[in-house]
Image (cartoon, grey):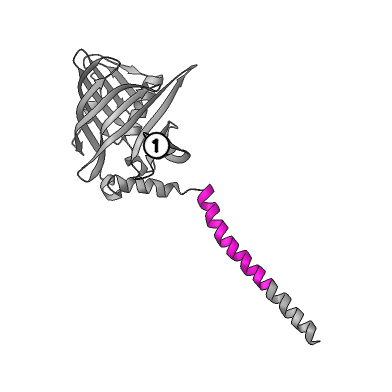
Amino acid sequence: MKNITIKKQLRMRSARTAVEYFFILISIIVPFASCTHEPNYGTVTEKIIEAYGGRERLAKVMSIAAEGLITALVRGDEGVYRRALKRDGKLFVDIIYKRSTERRILNGPKGYRGTKDQLEEVSGPRYLAMVYQYNELNLPYGFLDKSYTVSEIRKDRLNGEDVRVFRCTDRANNVMEVSVSVENYRIVKSSGTFVMGTQSTSLSSEYSDFRSVNGILFPFRIDNYADGYKISVIIITRYMVNPPINDSLFAPRGTK
């Protein structure tokens, strides 16, 4: 009788040990599986926001203006580069080359392109290219109000640096890829592809020479590419945060 009792106690102890081991195993596996298969993109965007100056500072940014110099490698020309952005879907870009000029205006659902004296409304890839430019310049501010749906698509290397590449989709389903430095969470590249019929064009920009302006991080060098070929280099000389920008700037003469 005593031997039976001892054997029963041993079986119960063995069962408890198995249960305890199971729960220890689960406590290890579940967090590991969660991190591996369901990355917390909210954490990533928060780290990007923090790297650029923090949520409190970035939330106050409603407009940004910049001016600098541009070297157009394809044109074989150079000149003055100016732009103004309002975070309600408006972008104004004005380039004065030595031999020509170029102006682009995005005003929500409408886009215009040409020169100071002659602008035409554009559609298709030419309009989408301006939307893409607005979206890239709206980073990282667009993360604050969740203007973009974010998902990680791969890990990569860029200019000798480890990066994580994310797909950012805006509310109109326009997509761009954004490369973020693993080391400091700075956005070092953005790219977008535009398709019309059987033709497609890819645009990308690489960002470097980061400096702080009013506590907010900005890139002072932008290298622009089209279909993988470098087409221009922009060196920003001055950023202005929240300058007063009249909406008339984004309405070409004769339009509303």
In the shown orientation, is residue 195 left or right of residue 243?
right
* Residue position marked by numbered label 1 in the rendering: 179
Residue 36 sits inside the magenta stretch: yes
Circle 1 residues within 10 Å: few <14, some 14–19, many ≥20: many
Question: Quadrant location of residue 141?
Answer: top left
Residue 65: image location, x then y, percent:
21, 33
Which of the two residues, 56 or 234, is positioned nearer the viewer here? Answer: 234
Which stretch appears magenta? 15-38
Q: Residue at point 30% right, 20% down?
A: 112
Looking at the image, residue 148 sits to the left or right of residue 31; the answer is left
Single out the residue that lies furthest toward the right.
1
Q: How many marks?
A: 1
Please say if 57 is above or below 193: below
**Vertical side of 23 occupied by 235: above or below:** above
Instruction: State whether the magenta stretch is mostly helix, strand or loop.
Output: helix
Amino acid type indicated by mark 1? Ser
Q: Name the residue located 34 percent from the left edge and 36 percent from the top edge.
A: 188
Asked where in the image residue 224 lies, by quadrant, the reply is: top left
